[in-house]
Amino acid sequence: MKKNFLEVGKIVGTHGVRGMVRIQPWCDSAEFFCALKKVFLDDAGKDKLTFTKSSPHGNVVIAAVKGVDSIEEAEKLRNKVIYMDR
């Protein structure tokens, strides 16, 4: 049986004080990951995140998440695995 949601990365930390996160992409390239605008925090598609902007930064991706405006809110996302809808 095919999985509907695939693991594409992990939030590994914060970036700055305005709620941006650092993501370790597990896909072919950081550029591919940056093309994703909607991702999920579970493999059932219930917990959705929307990126307002993202860009490659070395071997990680720096992303701004809609509704996450402080470093404290971004810190709550640390170590979360990110899924995309197939």
Image (cartoon, helix red, strand yellow):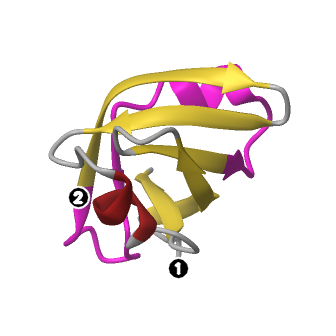
Q: Amino acid at mark 2?
A: Lys
In the image: residue 10, left or right of residue 26: left
- Residue 79 quadrant: bottom right
Who's the residue at 77% across and 29% down the image?
29
Q: Which residues are magenta?
A: 24-48
Who's the residue at 23% across and 44% down the image?
69
Residue that mark 2 sits on: 48
Who's the residue at 28% across and 50% down the image?
70
Q: Is residue 12 magenta?
A: no
Who's the residue at 52% across and 79% down the image?
1
Q: Percent position (x, y) of residue 22? A: 60, 46
Q: Percent position (x, y) of residue 65? A: 31, 41
- Residue 46 quadrant: bottom left
- Residue 40 quadrant: bottom left
Kindly check if marks 1 and 2 are in contact, taking CB atoms under 8 A apart as contact. no
Name the residue furthest left: 67
- Nearest to viewer (mark 1 / mark 2): 2
Exactly how many numbered labels are in the figure? 2
| Circle 1 SS class | loop
Q: Amino acid at mark 1?
A: Met
Q: CA distance from mark 1 to mark 2?
A: 23 Å
| Residue 8 at least partly seen | no
Residue that mark 1 sits on: 1
Q: Percent position (x, y) of residue 21? A: 50, 47
Q: Percent position (x, y) of residue 45? A: 26, 68
Q: Earlier in the sequence, mark 1 or mark 2?
A: 1
| Circle 2 SS class | strand
| Residue 14 at least partly seen | yes
